[in-house]
Image (cartoon, coloured by chain):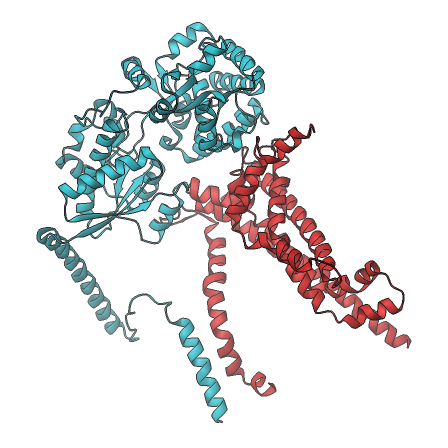
Amino acid sequence: MKKYMGNKLAILLFVLPALAIFITFDFIPIIQVFAYSFTDWNGLTIPNFTGIKNYLDLFTDRVFATSNRNQLIFAVVITIYQMLFATVFAITISDKKMKGRKFLRVAYFIPVILSVTVVCQLWSAVLAGDGLLNKLFEAGNFDFKQNWLGDRYKAIYVIAFVNAWQWMGYQFALIVAGIKSIPSDYYEAARIDGCSNVLAHLKITIPLLAETYKFCLIISLTGGIKAFTEMNILTGGGPNKSTYTLTYMMYNAAFKKSDYGYGLAAASVMVVECMLVMLVINFIFRDRDQKKEEEKARRKRRA
Amino acid sequence: MKKRILSTLVCLTVAATSIIGCGSKAPVEETGKDTAAAETTTEAKTEEKAEEKAEENATETTEASGDKVTLSIYTQYADDDTKVPYDYAVEQLKEAYPNVELNLIVQAQDDGQTLKTLAATGQLPDIYQASTDIINTFRESNQIMVLNEVAQSTGFLDKLYDANKDLAYAEDGNIYAFPFSGQEYVLWYYNKALFEENGLEIPETYDDLLNCIEVFKGKGITPLALFGQEGWNTAAAYDVIATRYAEGGIKALDEGKASITDEGYVNAAKKMEELVAAGLYQEDATTTNYDQASEKFLSGEAAMFINGQWYIEDATKALGDNVDWMFYPAADAASYEAGKAVFSGGGSASGFAVNPDSANAELAAEVAEFITEKYCEAKVMYRHNPLVAIDTGKEPDSEYPAMMKKLSDTLPSITATTKFTWGLTNSTFNDAIQSESQGLVSGQFTADEFVQDIADTME
């Protein structure tokens, strides 16, 4: 292994294909997105450089604030829902004494393999004005009948729930895999020390899954920022753009108004937001590792 | 050493196989010398020209020899109103152009996204259905053929109804598409039986309409089913009110001849806000699609419906004599009478366009014109819709429905029309009116917000 790692030509040749693909299909398009965001361009003709006009227009667009608010709500709702339920369900089915754990493991994951369109159509039927949910409330004489998808302020929470419901299974699978990798010795030792099940999971499972949670957090938060499909199918971004996100702004500007420059300015801001979120998450988790190392060093010194 | 050579070879193979396929055609070799490069470029150009000539000759030979030519066509093929004309045109084409075959690419309801992507990647179909927005965009990038000569030589211009002459021409005076739809109208349909059962007269004023809303809501009937998920329907719902206050409706706003802050438009927004608050539309109107809203109306769950005149056929089939359309209600009796001559809707310069870079561009232009004529014929004969762009000389296979007769009788007295959203030329306004009118329909945005937001957007 050492021999290969010392061979720079071999490293270069192994890295080159992946690097070339990344540069061609990811890096260059992202650079192009930023470059074209400073132009007036309809997607077909030669772009005209307009400086920061698109950004000035974007920041003063009332939909920009709405989009960012929606992204934040969406990201927070799906993160809390998915991580909370995925953890609870994963811990529950990791108990070997539990009956029906195989069935539940499959059941929790089924929504993930369904098409987003199918899931949205299903929830659309449930949440429609005369849909199943309102009918149930009506039948039970509950006064909770709502215009679930047509409400200016509440619709984004409902859309976020639909997304969280579908993708919770993905995080569930990751956490289950993480739990399986924890040696059972730790739990046996905890049990001998008189530790309860809940405390054992709090003190052993969750801290040891830090890296898994970091990954889950990144996909939830960036997924929230990039959200588009669910609002496109369930509400069409309405009413009056109240369920828009930056991705929707980009789509609307590019394909409805043929204003690619403006759309790409929205896309650029979205890319920056995603990168910032990842940086913050990395910083938070790196900070913890560093703290641990510092504490270890202190203990050693004391010893 | 052997292992080292082997590993290097494996790496090179992996790299080579990853790169294979990224290239397009065989690249011109770079010699590094200016002269050689120039020669190579010249040779390449000559080859390209030769290829083009060969293609042209091939087309001519194909036509002369009777070999099959396949033309791709991107058009709507979703319901009877789009399937019947297309199928009829294909049948007729087999007789008139036996050597031409059409390869249908079904148009996606995606605001032109697919077509624009095809254009950006140089893969436009030979013939495509183009809206005003597409025509304006492709005009700038020269991806739409000028059809002036074909329109002249095929006699298309002579067949156009006088009222539709303007529809053929774009803003720059050229013909880019053969329109098949003539002047179209937004009709306010109502269920006669429901009105009679509830002892209601056709509303002429907004006070009458408010009374109807109260009665219908009391009986658990939706007064008017709107498919507000589609922005054009909410824009039309605003336009039918706006035209009662300002004759130009959304067309005048689109053309910049009026401002949304003008008294008439503000009053229209306030009236719509009042009607929404009274419950004119179903509560979830903004998330209702066409199928759901139409089902409500046709099943008698809703008393009124707003749609184009193309809905006459379907409505008559389902409701028979129990369905009719009414003139739009107005603020008072005088405005109601005056407003009978003004309709929401209108024609647009959209129709079949041709890709100028097509290998068979000239043939495609002829076929596009032919298909347009056949579309018009099918609409008249089988869809009982005489409101087509050209005079087909055809008669319907059965009598026109009563609603169509009533509309035909009304046509001579119509003095002004507005536009459907797909006929609007200002894409910024188009986007704004669709979303803002949806906001008004939802009942969660005020008339003041509606006016202010559109005014801000148009600044």
Q: Position of residue B143 (x, y in %)?
A: 29, 46
User: What is the residue that sits farthest to the top in this orientation?
Assistant: B334
- At a point 35% along the width and 24% down the height, the residue shown is B317
Residue A211 image-quadrant placement: bottom right
Please say whether residue A126 is visible from this viewpoint: yes
Q: Who is closer to the viewer here, A48 or A121?
A: A121
Q: Position of residue B459 (x, y in %)?
A: 49, 31
Q: Is residue B374 above or below residue B357?
A: above
User: What is the residue that sits farthest to the front in this orientation?
Assistant: A99
- At a point 33% along the width and 40% down the height, the residue shown is B77
Please say whether residue A214 is visible from this viewpoint: no
Spot the cyan chain and give its letter.
B
User: What is the residue that sits farthest to the bottom in this orientation?
Assistant: B1
Chain A image colour: red
Q: How many marks?
A: 0
Residue A239 image-quadrant placement: top right
Q: Position of residue B41 (x, y in %)?
A: 24, 67
Q: Position of residue B347 (x, y in %)?
A: 31, 27
Q: Who is closer to the viewer here, B318 or B12?
A: B318
- At a point 51% along the width and 29% down the height, the residue shown is B438
Q: Does residue A53 appear left or right of residue B415 in this picture?
A: right
Q: Is residue A124 above or below residue B72?
A: above
